[in-house]
Amino acid sequence: MRVNVLLFATLKDIIGQNRLSITLPDDATVEEVKHALAALYPALEAHIAVAVAAVNQEYAFASDAVRDGDEVAFFPPVSGGSGSYPEIFRLAGEPVSADELMAAVTIPATGAVCIFSGMVRGETARSGEQLKTEHLEYEAYEPMALAKMRQVAAEIRERWPLVQGIAIVQRVGRLEVGQNTILIACSSGHRDQGCFEAARYGIDRLKEIVPVWKKEVRLDGAAWVEGAYHPTPQDRR
């Protein structure tokens, strides 16, 4: 059988492409896909061994079977609600207005909106050094990223049922120092009905399960920033 493989961030850079098709035995598993890729591209071996996997846009694990024609994606650990309330999930290539987003999650019964905005830092302290960032480059596994944004919203609603509107907008592409990288907005009838906690949970959870990565570009070089969280079966929906 043949499967379609997608590679992101560091993995893509190592082999110089982000999409390929490989032939496997009919009873292959995700782990065997990893072995096949390492055999084809030895430079991938250490990275593919710890990469997160997804099959057909859902997290997958070593013993999960793959089938002919499946889309199998590998990427580093990541650096939907229901009802009548407004929800926005978007990967944006252009700047996003916080005012417009706040208006979009507001209904007549809204009395509070909490917005979290991530920013591109120009300086980062790391290993005793003060590193200067020139710009960031963001990429996403788009269909899965949007699906996982919806999952984050659904989890928010389970924990804070009085939250009204939810918006999660992640920037992609090149971002300059001082630009926002992500906006998460949560509205509620009153400030004590979960909007603060929901926005905080939204950004923390996004960094765990939404497949988006950033490359830091500095005067002395560039590198993908990889997270440490590896999804578990409980992260599937």
Image (cartoon, rainbow, N blue to C red):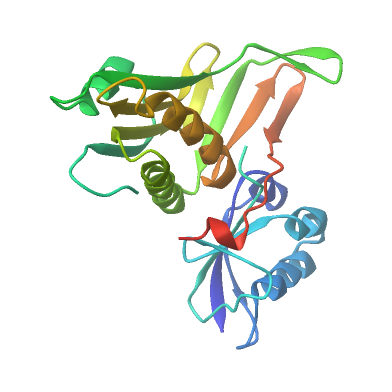
Quarter placement of the N terminus: bottom right
| Residue at image point 61% right, 52% down | 17
Q: Position of residue 57 (x, y in %)?
A: 47, 60
Residue 136 sits above or below residue 51 on the image: above
On the picture, is 49 further left or further right than 186?
right
Res 66 → quadrant? bottom right
Is any atom of residue 234 visible in this view?
yes
- The front one of 108 and 17 is 108
> What residue occupies the far left of the structure in this picture?
108
Residue 52 drawn at (x, y percent): 65, 56
* Residue 64 point in image, percent of width and height: 61, 75
Q: Is residue 61 left or right of residue 161?
A: right
Residue shown at 40% from the left, 52% from the top: 147
> Which residue appears farthest toward the right when viewing the image?
128
**Residue 99 appears at what percent x and percent y?**
27, 15
> Does 41 sit above or below residue 176?
below
Seen at 60% across and 33% down, the residue is 214
Split into 4 quadrants, where in the image is the C terminus? bottom left
Q: Nearer the viewer, residue 42 or 164?
A: 164
Front-lying residue, 87 or 30: 87
Relative to residue 186, is residue 135 depicted above or below? above
Image check: 173 left or right of 5? left
* Residue sitting at the far front: 192
Task: Say above or below: 10 vs 191.
Answer: below
Q: Exactly how many numbered labels are in the figure?
A: 0
